Amino acid sequence: MRTLYHLWLSPFCRKVRIALAEKKLDFELKSENPNERRAEFLALNPACDIPVLVEDGGPVIANSGAIGEYLEEICPDPPLYPGGPSERAEIRRLIAWFDIKFNVEVTENLVGEKLMKRLMRKGAPDSRAIRAGRENFHIHMDYIAWLTERRNWLGGDDFSMADIAAGAHLSCLDYINDVPWADHEPAREWYARLKSRPSFRAILADHIPGEPPPKHYADLDFSRRRTGVGKNNLQAIRSTESRMMPAVRR
């Protein structure tokens, strides 16, 4: 059976877990702390980062983007990069948006500072980074609203890896109870649809010892309070798209 080396609150690992579940491919999980730099893990991936997918008697694939593309090649149904060249390009653009820009501006500033630093024993959280992450969060949530007002799913008419990438990040942030759902109803409604998919069940069952999620984390109908979306941010979002950060390896 294939093996996925992962960390529980890594959005990149969660993205691969959801994709494997969507494809209905069996796999086992092995928790890996890259900071330990185990010789056995370095032999699999000299970059010593996660996720890493090891096929039973087959190849070793590192990097969530490479794994996602690999899974699409070996198991094209159901497609996670649906449509023609332009549709697939848009899906890949949105994956980059969440795995690069959202990760740097929100996930690292909140999950990284508030939880992962402590779990990985990397020192005290930076209050300035946490404050910046919360401020940035609203713009990104409004961007999700802007997309869902115009499309059925984030990347277009069909569910895709773009939804998985975004949902993986939001699930980590929701685990630490730091998503401003009450201020962003369209994003909440999109995420509720995502949570309802069978591929999300294992993610919602995650429970880190000593760090339990909030009560609503696994609730498929986790909020019914409707509030207005920050429309003033929508204009900022359009200009933000043109300022994508340089690509980094994930």
Image (cartoon, rainbow, N blue to C red):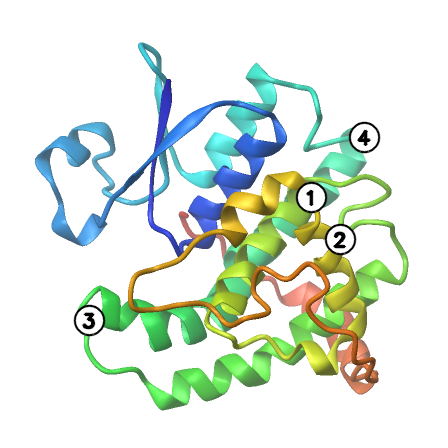
Could you give the CA–CA distance between mark 1 and mark 2, rounded to whole angstroms?
7 Å
The reply to whether residue 93 is visible in this rendering is no
- Discs 2/3, front: 2
What crowding class fits label 2: few (fewer than 14 Cα within 10 Å), some (14-19), or many (20 or more)?
few
Compared to residue 196, the image places residue 103 above or below, namely below
> Is 202 in front, or is 112?
202
* Dot label at residue 197: 1
Neighbour class for label 1 at 10 Å: few (<14), some, many (≥20)? few
Q: CA distance from mark 3 to mark 1?
A: 35 Å
Q: Earlier in the sequence, mark 3 or mark 4?
A: 4
Helix, strand or loop at disc 3? loop
Q: Which residue has dot 3 on it?
A: 122
Cα–Cα span, label 4 and label 1: 21 Å
Q: Is residue 180 above or below residue 216?
A: below
Q: Which residue is depicted at the point 34% across and 69% down?
A: 211
Q: Which residue is label 2 attached to? A: 193
Residue that badge 4 annotates: 83
